[in-house]
């Protein structure tokens, strides 16, 4: 490939180790992240073929999906088995594993960046769709299926056809009280859950440059909810400042060399994207979902939409199904929706900045009677930091439950689940039917909205609190 390139193309080209006509490329993988939910079959596969993990030193494993967040003992037999298999597989192959309760354990997409293992220019893979999170560092990061996990374990490479390139340009300045989660939900509401299908989205614009690394990860995390394979933000001063001094970050002259290289990781001026979308953020307000996919979202000040008014018959039918499942009537103000459970956590919004945003709202206030609030830090490091900053005290003092790290209520794979038709304001990324419990109802929100909702017992923004 010659001429002007997008950042995604540069990252791709610098990792191609074999290319043939009418064949997928063979890409080198710089970092392979592993968790218990999608790795056991892959390890079985290489064991059956009498192979070894090719680069255990480039592989990192965590326990996150199946671990309970209220205990260090995994009581659920299925979860216990999953975690047990990961422990054995990592021990067999010499892979570094962060176990439940250990100081650096946490959700895979929180831990990788936190220890500095994810760096600009890398290819990062994991058998998990939200691997898109790591694109916040200017890395080409995407989720793969279990058979690809096996291929990566065995060879440290992946066979894959090139993605399309897409630019999402956020224009205008973000209003106060609006954050990365709102940006993501507003974008998905605009382009739909397949708006980015088959593409790597590069995010640009002053609103993106102004985001912290944590917020950039929130945005890139949600790329996959827009159907994209990956999300990407070119590295800048914010990226370097975040990485400097972290465990895996280069040091001394290695750091200088790395920074020089990282600065080159930008889309060339004349590069052409396959698709370009502009999202105006200057009037953006906190966004919440009303339906059963992340694109079914409106500003918090809005109402539950009326399927009658939808021109696209497919959207109309989907909206009817959503309203039925969610138990909602068209025209109901979103602010009138009573909430049973508030969940702050996940790889979307379980980082220190997210907890700070929630704690700021909760300070000096209480969780409403009858509302259960779970605050689940994304990692042990986040937990420790939050405790050092006094945030845990704020949560406990407000009557919320301060938990151990894990995927928790983001999906019903562990003991944190909604019961019956409980309605939840959740800072996670998916609101599909059954996601948080077989008949549970999920409204996706930002950490600030989650906290304000916990105080009022209905969907609310911090601006409404007295
Ligand atoms: C369990 C895993 C395969 C899944 C994913 O790929 O994203 C999970 O993390 C999720 O968020 O739904
Ligand atoms: S926190 Fe949720 S979205 Fe993230 S990896 Fe875990 S289950 Fe998937």
Image: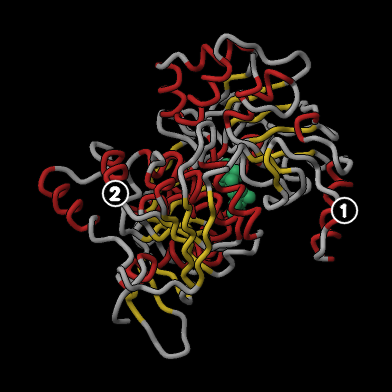
Dividing the picture into quarters, in which one does residue 125 lie? bottom left
SS at badge 1: helix
Image side of residue 139 versus residue 282, left or right? left
Q: Are marks 2 and 1 in contact (CB under 8 Å)?
A: no
* Crowd band around label 1 with a 10 angstrom C-alpha radius: few (<14), some (14–19), many (20+): many
Q: Report the Cα–Cα distance between label 2 and label 1.
A: 44 Å
User: Which one is nearer the viewer's eye here, 232 or 288?
Assistant: 288
Q: Which mark is residue 320?
A: 1
What residue is at 86 percent from the left and 40 percent from the top?
328
Where 273 sits versus 364, above or below? below
Mark 1 and ligand 1: say if the CB distance to the nearest ligand atom is below 8 Å. Answer: no
Residue 198's spot in the image, x, y percent? 55, 70
Secondary element at image label 2:
loop
Q: Which residue is mark 2?
A: 236
Quarter in which the N terminus is drawn: bottom left
Q: Position of residue 382 (x, y in %)?
A: 44, 28
């Amino acid at each position: 490939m010659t001429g002007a390139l997008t950042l995604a193309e540069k990252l791709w080209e610098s990792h191609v180790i074999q290319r043939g006509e009418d064949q997928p490329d063979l890409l080198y993988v710089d970092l392979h992240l592993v968790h218990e939910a999608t790795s056991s079959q892959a390890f079985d596969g290489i064991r059956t073929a009498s192979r070894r993990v090719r680069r255990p030193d480039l592989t990192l494993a965590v326990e996150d999906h199946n671990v309970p967040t209220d205990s260090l003992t995994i009581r659920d037999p299925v979860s216990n088995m999953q975690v047990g298999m990961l422990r054995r597989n990592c021990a067999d192959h010499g892979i570094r594993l962060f176990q439940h309760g250990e100081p650096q354990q946490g959700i895979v997409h929180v831990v990788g960046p936190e220890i500095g293992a994810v760096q600009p220019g890398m290819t990062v893979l994991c058998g998990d769709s939200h691997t898109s999170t790591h694109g916040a560092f200017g890395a080409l990061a995407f989720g793969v299926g279990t058979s690809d996990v096996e291929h990566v374990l065995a060879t440290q490479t992946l066979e894959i056809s090139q993605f399309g390139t897409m630019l999402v340009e956020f224009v205008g300045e973000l209003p106060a009280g609006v954050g990365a989660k709102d940006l993501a939900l507003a974008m998905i509401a605009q382009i739909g859950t397949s708006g980015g299908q088959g593409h790597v989205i590069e995010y640009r614009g002053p609103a993106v440059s102004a985001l912290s690394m944590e917020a950039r990860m929130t945005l890139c995390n949600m790329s996959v909810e827009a159907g994209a394979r990956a999300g990407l933000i070119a590295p800048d001063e914010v990226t370097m400042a975040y990485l400097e001094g972290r465990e895996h970050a280069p040091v001394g002259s290695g750091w200088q060399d790395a920074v020089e290289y990282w600065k080159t990781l930008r889309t060339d001026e004349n590069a052409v994207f396959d698709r370009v979308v502009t999202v105006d953020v200057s009037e953006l307000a906190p966004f919440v979902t009303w339906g059963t996919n992340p694109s079914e979202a409106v500003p918090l000040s809005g109402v539950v939409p009326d399927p009658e008014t939808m021109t696209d018959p497919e959207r109309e039918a989907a909206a009817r199904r959503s309203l039925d499942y969610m138990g909602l009537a068209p025209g109901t103000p979103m602010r009138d929706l009573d909430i049973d459970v508030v969940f702050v956590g996940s790889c979307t919004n379980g980082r220190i900045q997210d907890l700070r945003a929630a704690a700021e709202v909760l300070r000096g206030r209480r969780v409403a009677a009858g509302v259960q609030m779970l605050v689940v830090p994304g990692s042990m490091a986040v937990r420790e930091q939050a405790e050092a900053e006094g945030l845990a005290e704020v949560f406990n003092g407000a009557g919320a439950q301060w938990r151990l790290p894990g995927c928790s209520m983001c999906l019903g794979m562990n003991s944190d689940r909604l019961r019956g038709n409980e309605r939840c304001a959740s800072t996670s990324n998916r609101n599909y039917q059954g996601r948080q419990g077989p008949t549970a109802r999920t409204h996706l929100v930002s950490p600030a909205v989650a906290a304000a909702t916990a105080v009022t017992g209905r969907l609310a923004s911090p601006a409404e609190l007295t």
